[in-house]
């Protein structure tokens, strides 16, 4: 059975503008949930912020991925839950090409990807479990588009903010992301004088607060 829900509302452009200059790991200094752990980028450097369009497939059948790729809009991120099958690839050259042609800004695949060399030219940033020559099939068994999914330990809802860079990816509800860019930037800016101080012989432990725990 296939479920195809409506496309989610897209995240506000201001969220994209505010989060884009900041690092995902700066968010990792502040919270523990919402990170997909164990996914790696197809190339570095990598950076994108966009709207989650979610897909859930049974391990073998990527019919719903091909349906969803056709539905992508500029600014979207294709997010695929392969129901725990991390070895198969549902995302190769033609799916990548389609996503890029529709204006998607990236993809997050909780499974493997294929057609590495072909996709270099398409310049679509992708985080996944790695590369594999074993692919899914168009089997017409089942699949769901724009339902909540589970991605490497994170719950992702359609319309969530996908915040990705060379270190990995975090997912946020759009309301959680309001004001977050400014907070992350302030935290990053605070390191500028710290670097000058460390270069002059100063202490990272004093800067971070670790020094307070010295026995
Ligand atoms: O078709 C697939 O599912 C994977 C693939 O090789 C492609 O996208 O070119
Ligand atoms: Mg292919």
Image (spheres, rainbow, N blue to C red):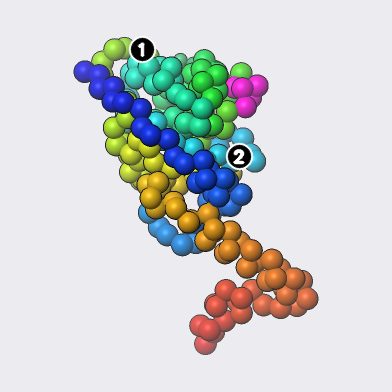
The residues colored magenta run 119-123
**Coordinates of residue 155 in the picture (x, y in percent):** 33, 43
Which class describes the residues within 10 Å of circle 2: few (<14), some (14-19), or many (20+)?
some
Label 2, ligand 1: CB separation under 8 Å: no
Chief secondary structure of the magenta portion: loop
Of badges 2 and 1, the one in the foreground is 2
**Coordinates of residue 166 in the picture (x, y in percent):** 58, 44
The residue labelled by disc 1 is: 138
Which residue reaches farthest top?
139
Measuring 55% from the left and 78% from the top, which residue is drawn there? 209
The residue labelled by disc 2 is: 46
Which residue reaches farthest bottom?
215
Direction from residue 156 to residue 20 in the image, left or right: right
Measuring 35% from the left and 35% from the top, which residue is drawn there? 158
Q: CA distance from mark 2 to mark 1?
A: 30 Å
Q: How many marks?
A: 2
Can residue 21 be seen in the rendering of this structure? Answer: yes
**Coordinates of residue 174 in the picture (x, y in percent):** 40, 46
Element marked by disc 1: loop
């Amino acid at each position: 059975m296939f479920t195809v829900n409506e496309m989610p509302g897209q995240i506000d452009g201001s969220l994209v503008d505010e989060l884009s200059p900041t690092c995902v790991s700066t968010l990792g200094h502040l919270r523990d949930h919402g990170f997909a752990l164990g996914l790696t980028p197809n190339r570095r450097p990598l950076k994108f912020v966009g709207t989650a369009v979610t897909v859930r497939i049974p391990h073998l059948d990527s019919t719903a991925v091909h349906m969803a790729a056709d539905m992508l809009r500029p600014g979207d991120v294709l997010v695929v839950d392969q129901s725990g099958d991390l070895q198969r690839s549902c995302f190769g050259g033609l799916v990548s090409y389609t996503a890029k042609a529709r204006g998607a800004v990236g993809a997050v695949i909780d499974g493997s990807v294929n057609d590495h060399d072909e996709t270099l030219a398409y310049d679509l940033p992708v985080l996944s479990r790695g590369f594999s020559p074993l692919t899914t099939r168009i089997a017409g068994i089942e699949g769901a588009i724009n339902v909540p999914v589970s991605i490497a330990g994170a719950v992702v809802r359609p319309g969530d903010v996908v915040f990705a860079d060379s270190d990995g990816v975090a997912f946020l509800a759009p309301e959680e992301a309001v004001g977050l860019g400014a907070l992350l930037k302030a935290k990053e800016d605070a390191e500028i004088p710290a670097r000058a101080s460390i270069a002059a012989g100063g202490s990272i432990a004093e800067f971070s607060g670790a020094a307070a725990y010295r026995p």
